[in-house]
Amino acid sequence: MGVEINKFSDIIGVVATQNIPEGRMVLLTTHSFSYDFGSKTDLAGAKLPATAAEAAKALYVSVFAQDNRSLPILQPMPSYLYNLRNGWGVGSNNVPITGSTVYLTHPGNMTGQTIPSGQGMCAYGGGTFTVPSGAFIYSSTLVTPGAYLIAANTADDGGVTNAGKLKFSASATHIVTQRYNSTTKELTFRTLVP
């Protein structure tokens, strides 16, 4: 299972400015993505923190946007010139499907999925969330209830692999551990709106 949203007080629709694993902490930024004559330009962008200063501002949990499309979901949706009305039945030009991922269930229901760059997503802030192992950097201090956390950044914490993962911080004040399930290896934390 992916990210579990236990309680929230703030949700923002944003555009991923880079590939962002679900459950990572992100901050708001600008972007240049446009779709269907500018329909994404009115949304803020979201990115993983690159510096310690950005990590302190990364207070939003990245989550797939709800999707009402029929299954299977193809991401990105393949398209072919001059195939506007004929769908998949125009011959061998439509198969095999390459360059797309086929989801048989909503990607937000699966653990370890990545929100592709340029796709709409949700940024949750001010709430209680449960994330699976892999969305935080484990330490015995981090899993102690009441421990303060901060997002890892690409400059100090091992590059893009760890960017946005929660880690223990002695000086952070906006994200706090609520509980750790040692059986399922899931971390429940609370974000405090500044």
Image (spheres, rainbow, N blue to C red):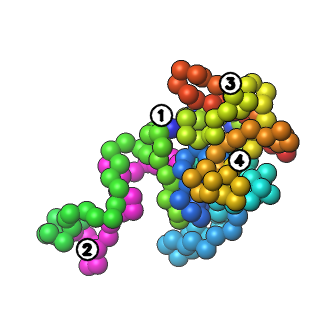
Rendered location of residue 2, percent (x, y):
51, 38
In this view of the protein, which residue sits in the foreground, 64 or 130?
130
Q: Is residue 42 above or below residue 65?
A: below
Q: Residue at x 70, y 41 (%)?
A: 167
* Mark 4 or 2: the one toward you: 4
Q: Which residue is mark 2?
A: 83
**Please, what secondary structure does the residue beneath circle 4 have?**
strand
Please tell me which residue lies in front, 150 or 126: 150
Question: Could you say which is closer to the camera, residue 24 or residue 158?
Answer: 158
User: Residue visible at 63% across and 35% down?
Assistant: 138
Q: Which residue is mark 4?
A: 151
Specify the segment rendered in magenta: 64-86
Q: Earlier in the sequence, mark 2 or mark 3?
A: 2
Label 2 packing within 10 angstroms: few (<14), some (14-19), many (20+): few
Inter-mark Cα distance, 1 to 2: 37 Å
Residue type of the residue flagged with mark 3: Arg
Cα gap from disc 3 to disc 1, whole angstroms: 18 Å
